[in-house]
Amino acid sequence: MKLLNFIRSFPAIKRRNENWKKASELVLEIARINKKLAEDAAVFKAIFCVSPIVMIVVGLEDGVIHEANQLFEEYTHYSRHEVIGKTIAEIKIYHDPTERDKVIKEIVEKGFIKNRPVAFMMKGGEVKRGLLSSKIITKDEKECLLSVIMGTTELDMLRDRRIGDCAKIEHNPSRLECFDKIEN
């Protein structure tokens, strides 16, 4: 024991002990950060899965589909296993094939798009219109698009709800007016 204390009394040994202490603190900090990242990833995955809006993650340059939520399946009639790993061009999701190039150009210029009207082709050939919002994200060290689509059904429900709210306000005895009516 005396020998160990004697060795620890040397400055070089003290520095090594301090370095080990700093290194162990860094390892613990990295573990805390990794835990936080895993928790954040789990939250994102849960939001992605339970979202009442169509969500999809697509490679920015190659158009390869990395993720699609349950509502994507219901909206397009494609199952996830049919589209994951395939390109947007392969499944022909855009009614107008040149539309994706326009969308990508706008996203690259601005970093995102919001509520851009787009016509989409479903698995059976049906065309549905919706509002596309997309933002560039990084997934597996690759630039991708996180895209959400609000289909016409959701838009009609929102419009009907707002019109109903306006009607309630108009018929209110206090004679409040609704200034944001939606035009048909």
Image (cartoon, rainbow, N blue to C red):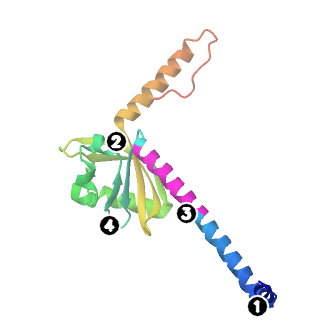
Pointer 4 residue: 62
- Give me the residue at 61% from left, 62% from top: 32
Q: CA distance from mark 2 to mark 1?
A: 62 Å
Q: Which residues are magenta?
A: 32-49
Disc 1 secondary structure class: helix
Label 2 is placed on what type of residue?
Leu
Q: Are marks 2 and 1 in contact (CB under 8 Å)?
A: no
Q: Is residue 94 above or below residue 18?
A: above
Which numbered disc flags the more N-terminal residue, 3 or 1? 1
Pointer 2 residue: 71
Please give left or right for residue 25 compared with residue 51 in the image. right
Q: CA distance from mark 3 to mark 1?
A: 33 Å
Which of 175 and 92 lies nearest the eye of the viewer?
A: 92
Number of numbered discs on residues = 4
Q: Residues within 10 Å of mark 1 (few under 14, many from 20)?
A: few
Pointer 3 residue: 34
Label 1 is placed on what type of residue?
Ala
Label 3 is placed on what type of residue?
Asn
Disc 3 secondary structure class: helix
